[in-house]
Image: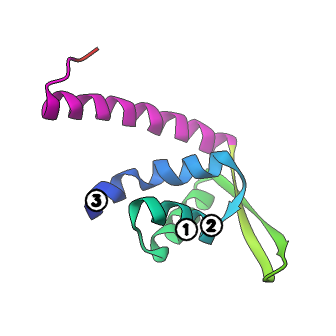
Amino acid sequence: MGAQLKKGVLDLVVLSKLSEKDTYGYDIYQDINKNMGISESTIYPILRKFTKDGLCETYLRESSYGPPRKYFKISRKGMNRLEDLTTDWRRFEKVVNILIRGDKYE
């Protein structure tokens, strides 16, 4: 998958992962990487931006593997953004399918 395609959907994918459960950056990276092939350094700027924009909140949780981990929790604003991005994605997907496969627009 091309880098520009990945970049265009990462906000949607990361917010979707955050909506499933509170989690930490490396866990998000591992989950997305096994399906899309991204670098670890891609996730952290997105999470910082989300925190700054109020789309998620952070808290520390003790870890049995070392120091406490920073967990990310999606906010109400983040859920609203996820809904908007999902709607945009579905519209975009329909248009692309029309263009590449000749699907009819519903």
Numbered disc 2: secondary structure: helix
Give residue 77's position: percent from left, percent from top: 63, 42
Mark 3 is surrounded, within 10 Å at the Cα level, by few (under 14), some (14 to 19) or many (20 or more) other residues, namely few
Q: In the rendered structure, are the residues bearing label 1 and label 2 in contact, judged by CB atoms less than 8 Å apart?
A: yes
Give residue 8's position: percent from left, percent from top: 34, 53
Q: Is residue 63 magenta?
A: no
User: Marks 3 and 2, Cα distance to the nearest angstrom?
Assistant: 21 Å
Placement of 104 over or under 63, stated as above or below: above
Which residue corresponds to the image point at 53% horizontal and 54% vertical from the top-left? 14
Mark closer to the chain start, 3 or 2: 3
Q: Which residue is mark 3?
A: 1
Instruction: Place residue 92 in its image quadrant.
Output: top left
Q: Which residue is mark 1?
A: 30
Give, as a three-letter code, the residue at label 3.
Met
Which contiguous range is marked in magenta?
Answer: 76-104
Mark 1 is surrounded, within 10 Å at the Cα level, by few (under 14), some (14 to 19) or many (20 or more) other residues, namely some
Placement of 25 over or under 8, stated as above or below: below
Placement of 85 over or under 50, stated as above or below: above
- Disc ID at residue 27: 2
Give, as a three-letter code, the residue at label 2.
Asp
| Residue found at the far front of this picture | 34
Give, as a three-letter code, the residue at label 1.
Gln
Instruction: Place residue 78 in its image quadrant.
Output: top right
Which residue corresponds to the image point at 45% horizontal and 70% vertical from the top-left? 42
Instruction: Place residue 69 in its image quadrant.
Output: bottom right
User: Marks 1 and 2, Cα distance to the nearest angstrom?
Assistant: 5 Å
Give residue 91's position: percent from left, percent from top: 33, 29
Numbered disc 3: secondary structure: loop
